[in-house]
Image (spheres, helix red, strand yellow):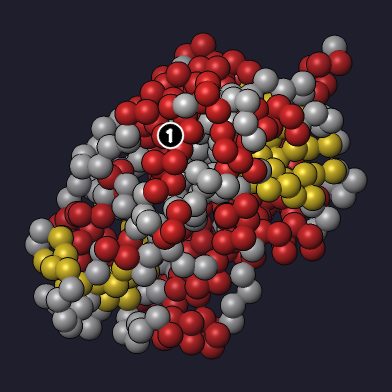
Amino acid sequence: MRIAVIDHVGNPGGGSRVARALLPALKKVRPGTSITFFGNPHSIKREKQDEIFKANGIAFHPLSSTKLGGKDLFNIRGSRHVMSLFQRKFAGTLSSVSFYLSGAVHKELEALVTDYDIAFFIWPFHLKCPELNCPMAGIFHDFNYKYFFSGQVMVPWVLELLNKEMPIWLSRATPIVSTEFMRGELQKFYPAFGHKTKVVPVAPTSHMSAVDKVAAEEIVKKRGITQNYILCPTNIGSHKNTGPLLAAFAQLKKKHSDLLLVFTGLGTEVIDGRACAVGVEMGCEPKDVYGLGYVSNEEIDALIQCATAVVNPSLYEGGNVPGFDAWERGVPVAMSDIPPFQEHVSVHGAHAEFFNPRSPEEIAAAIERILCDPEQMKQKALQSKEAISHFTWERAAEGYLNIFDEILGSLRQ
C-alpha cells in the first residue's frame, strides 16, 4: 500500500505528537507499506520529525506552499496569519505564480499526490479540499469552531473557510475520530455523513521520548522549577478554560503555599506571575504560576514525569492527550467531567479525579484529593498505566490500516 500522509499545519503539541508516533507504528505493523509525509517544513524542523522519519524508512516532502504562511516572519507574532489572509484574498491573482508565493496548499497537493493508493490527512482543517486521484481519509479531531465558549474567537475568514469546506471534505473523505463522543458531534453537525465515520482510540504520545528520572528532574530544574507543581499542558484558546483553574489554584495556595502551577503550550508564556481570584497578577514576584510557552517533546515528557499531577480543565476536546501521557508515566490526572474524558475511563479503564470545569471550587477539590492522599492516588495512577498499556500506537495503526483496506476494497467491488 502506498500512503501519502499530509499535515500542512503541524500543530504544536497534540497534532505533531500524533504524527511522530503514528507513522512509525504504521511501518512497524506493515513493513512493506510505502509512506510519504507531506508537511509544513517549519513544524518538521521544530519537532525534528525528519530524524524520526529517516530512522523508520518514511519519505518526507516539505510543502513549498506552507513556507510563507506557516511561520511568523521576522519573529513578529501573528504575521503568519496576515500572510495567510493575503494569500487567500489574492488567490485568483496569485494562481499563476509559484506555490511558495500563492500558498495554494490544495493545488500543490494535487500536483504532488498523484501516485498513491490513499491520502491520509492528519489535520484536514484550514485547507481547501484538494481533488486527488485517490481516496482520502482524515482525522477530524473536533468541531470546536461550531461553538462559542468565551473571549477569543476565530477570525472571520478562518471560520468562513471551515464552514464552507467541511461538507466538501466529508463528502470526499472518510472521517476518523478518536472517541464515540466525537462521532456523535460529527453526526450532529453533519448528519449526511455520520454513517461514514470511523472510531480509532488514541494511545499515549510520550513514549517517543525515553527520559529517565534523574534526567527528567534536571530538565525541569533548568526551567527554574524546584518545588512541587501541578502541570497543565494546553494553549490559550478559550475552550481550554484556564481561568477557572487559576482561580482554583489561588484557593489551593492558602493551604499549599509551596505548590506551583505550570503551563506549557503555544501562547502560555503570558500566563506567568502570581495566582489570584481573577487570574494571574502578571510579573509579580515571588511567582507561583509559570508559563513556559511551547516546549520540546523531551521537555514536556520530563515535565509530565515529575509533576505531582496533570490537570486538564478543557470544556471541549476530541480527547485528553495530556492525560494519556500522564497515565503512561504513572502520574495522577484531574480533568473536566465532559463526555470524551468520561469515555477514557469507560473504554480505557483509566482513573482520574473529575470536576465541573466551570467551578473553581470543584477544580480545587479534585486537585486537593490528589494532594491529600498521594499514596492512594499514585497507586491508581499506576493502575491506569497498566490499563492503557494495551492501547498502543501499533494497535491504533492496525485500526487505521484496516479502515484503509476497507476503503480500497470497496473501490474494487
Q: Nearer the viewer, residue 400 or 130?
A: 130
Please say whether residue 66 is visible from this viewpoint. yes
Image position, residue 64 (x, y; %): 64, 43
Q: Is residue 89 above or below residue 358?
A: above
Q: Residue furthest right?
A: 32
- Residue 309 location in percent, x, y? 37, 69
Q: Nearer the viewer, residue 386 or 324?
A: 324
Report if residue 142 is visible in the image: no
Residue 292 in percent (x, y) is at: 36, 69
- The three-letter code of the residue at mark 1 reads Phe
Quadrant containing the N terminus is top right
Q: Quadrant of residue 196?
A: top right
Quadrant in which residue 268 is drawn: bottom left
Q: Which residue is denoted by mark 1 in the rendering?
A: 86
Placement of 80 over or under 159, stated as above or below = below
Foreground residue among 153 and 211: 153
At x 31% / y 52%, what residue is drawn? 236
**Residue shown at 54% from the left, 88% from the top:** 214
